[in-house]
Amino acid sequence: MALKTLDSIIGLHIISQDAFDVGEIEDLRYDPTTWDIIGFKVKSNKYVASMLNAGSGKSMILIKPDHYVVNDVILFQDTLEDARSRISADNANIPSLSYISGKKIITSDNILLGSVEEIQFDSDKWSIVSMKVKLDKVACPLLGLKKGLFSKMAYGLLVRNIVSVSENVNLHLTMEELKDELAFD
């Protein structure tokens, strides 16, 4: 499992094997029921979008995940022409992962846990795994933590514990149940 964060992938350029700079990642599109990443939302370079018939210059395109090398750029293991089947015009009807960033997290017993600080995904399986949470001051004593000068963080909020994402991220766990689920700093 190769864990990456949303912040670590936004802004990376995608390069094809034949050295085309396909564009820059702006966001990730995901399936809210399976938490699988459907594609990269990419601001394409003008020549690439027209070559692929996926919009006009500087269009947003959607690139389906595959076996890519992820470092300071993302490398296709095939040419731009061979990757054509995985590239289409972006679909704004598919939810963006950045939409979740900063949202408040509410437990099933209606207590504010905190807000989404970071989102982690597995870049081998292209699925969202967990979230890092900036804890609310009210949640700290309920979780058995002492309040401090600095914000406390919780790690390992698994997406399988999320019931829905709307104005808030709603969990099916109570605050008491989260004590055993999360790691704290």
Image (tube, helix red, strand yellow):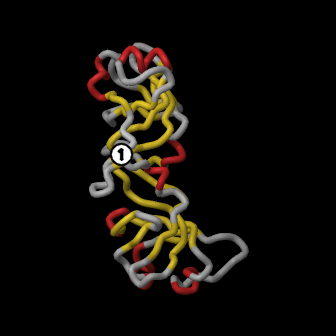
Q: How many marks?
A: 1
Judging depth in this view, the residue of 72 and 31 nearest the camera is 31
Q: In this figure, which residue is indicated by the disc labeled 1?
A: 93
Left or right for 7, reference 38: right
User: Which residue in the rendered view is the most extreme toward the right?
Assistant: 149
Query: Percent x, y for residue 99?
Result: 48, 53
Three-letter amino acid code of the residue under disc 1: Asn
Q: Quadrant of residue 76?
A: top left
Query: Percent x, y for residue 30?
Result: 35, 48
Judging depth in this view, the residue of 101 and 76 nearest the camera is 101
Q: Is residue 166 above or below residue 49?
A: below
Which element is circle 1 on? Answer: loop
Please state, as top left, top right, bottom left or bottom right, where the C terminus lies in the image.
bottom right
User: Badge 1, how many Cα within 10 Å: few under 14, some, many 20+?
Assistant: few
Q: Is residue 131 above or below residue 66?
A: below
Query: Which residue appears at 51% of the width and 30% of the height?
Result: 24
Left or right for 148, reference 73: right
Left or right for 79, reference 142: left
Query: Which residue appears at 36% of the width and 32% of the height?
Result: 63
Query: Which residue appears at 46% of the width and 61% of the height?
Result: 131
Query: Percent x, y for residue 166?
Result: 42, 64
Query: Which residue appears at 32% of the width and 15% of the height?
Result: 81
Query: Percent x, y for residue 84?
Result: 30, 21
